Amino acid sequence: MAGFAGHDARQSIAVGLAGTESEPLNIPDPREVDEGVDRTIANWRAWTDKFQYDGPWAADVARSALALKLLLHSPSGAIAAAATTSLPENPAGGKNWDYRYAWVCDTAYTLRALIRFGVREEVHAAVAWLLKVIRANDPLVNVLYTLGGELPGGTERPDVPGWRGIGPVVNGNRAADQLQLSIFGDLFSIVWLYVDAGNVLDASTGRLLATIADQTCDSWQQRDAGIWELEDEQHFTSSKLGCWQALDCAVYLAEDGQIPGIPDRWRAERANQGVHRRELLVGRAAVLHGISRRGRARCFGTAGGGADHRTLARCHHEAIGE
């Protein structure tokens, strides 16, 4: 490993770090490093010029979009949930997680924003990568994947100090082995937005999505870990709604000719989920009531309970301060 520096007539200074492993070390010309910095700045400015947003806080929104683009893994098209691992959620430590993976749900949130902003190349790369990875691993969509498209292995805790000494430092994420039913809705929402943006699905992708829609029908009544990745599996409201969303999108895509077959079973299961709509709404009421009484969100509320529509309305008004 070696460091080097150079400067030009503008008196700017370029500092570079070159490294290798088990091979000779090539030290680039400092002028090439400086030119590379200029090219990088030009590329980011060109991307920002194509960025489409006409609304309040435009500069801040553009900076946020640049942060999302930074999470795009260029060699594969994957979108990382974060570029960090083991930053503590609690000063006392313990809640340190590794987010350097591509979560299906985070990918959905990011693509929803990028599609709205008129970004096309990055959206196509991420959608194509995700569908290819699901096809290569297991049609039952996994919670997260490595940026290279593999299924994550286990976790390890190297003996190194964490940020400001707050540990542990973690490689890997235990959520990889969980069942989270809401990701069916996340996946189908991605595809729906992609198609609505003017794109067309290939036949192989259509068959894959039809298989996943069938698996949603088979799985939606199971307990799962929920979006908050809890160890105790329960019937979570958000998970049931995610499955309903997946089937709703699947029916739409089938009627649009993007998915093969007749979606009668998806319609039937979607309607069957509607029988449970009251329980889902009651679960939502429990969430809102928890916010109004305790002043903090418990947005992973479970389905079930026994409130009527008046209780739902009262909890809603209390939660939003009406």
Image: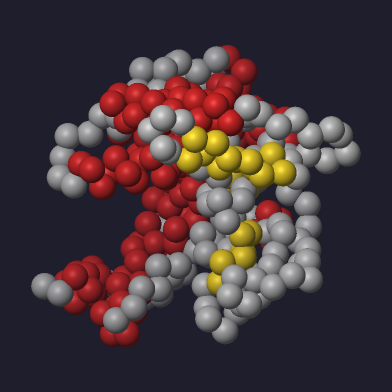
Farthest-out residue, right: 22
What residue is at 29 percent from the left and 81 percent from the top?
295
Quadrant where the C terminus sits is bottom left
Answer left or right for 307 relative to 148.
left
What residue is at 36 percent from the left and 40 percent from the top?
65
Q: How many marks?
A: 0
Q: Position of residue 225 (x, y in %)?
A: 59, 63
Farthest-out residue, left: 322
Answer left or right for 246 relative to 24.
left
How was this image coloured?
secondary structure
What residue is at 23 percent from the left and 43 percent from the top?
59
Q: Position of residue 261 (x, y in %)?
A: 54, 20
In this orientation, which residue lies closer to the viewer: 153 or 257?
Answer: 153
Q: Is residue 176 above or below residue 44?
A: below
What residue is at 58 percent from the left and 63 percent from the top?
229
Answer left or right for 271 relative to 77.
left
In this orientation, which residue lies closer to the viewer: 230 or 86?
Answer: 86
Instruction: Locate residue 66: give its quadrant.
Output: top left
Q: Quick check: can you spot residue 5?
A: yes
Q: Position of residue 162 (x, y in %)?
A: 65, 71
In this orientation, which residue lies closer to the viewer: 264 or 41?
Answer: 41
Q: Position of residue 194 (x, y in %)?
A: 41, 26
Q: Quick check: can you spot residue 191?
A: no
Q: Is residue 175 above or below residue 183?
A: below
Quadrant where the N terminus sits is top right
Q: Is residue 47 above or below residue 304?
A: above
Instruction: Locate residue 77: give its quadrant.
Output: top right
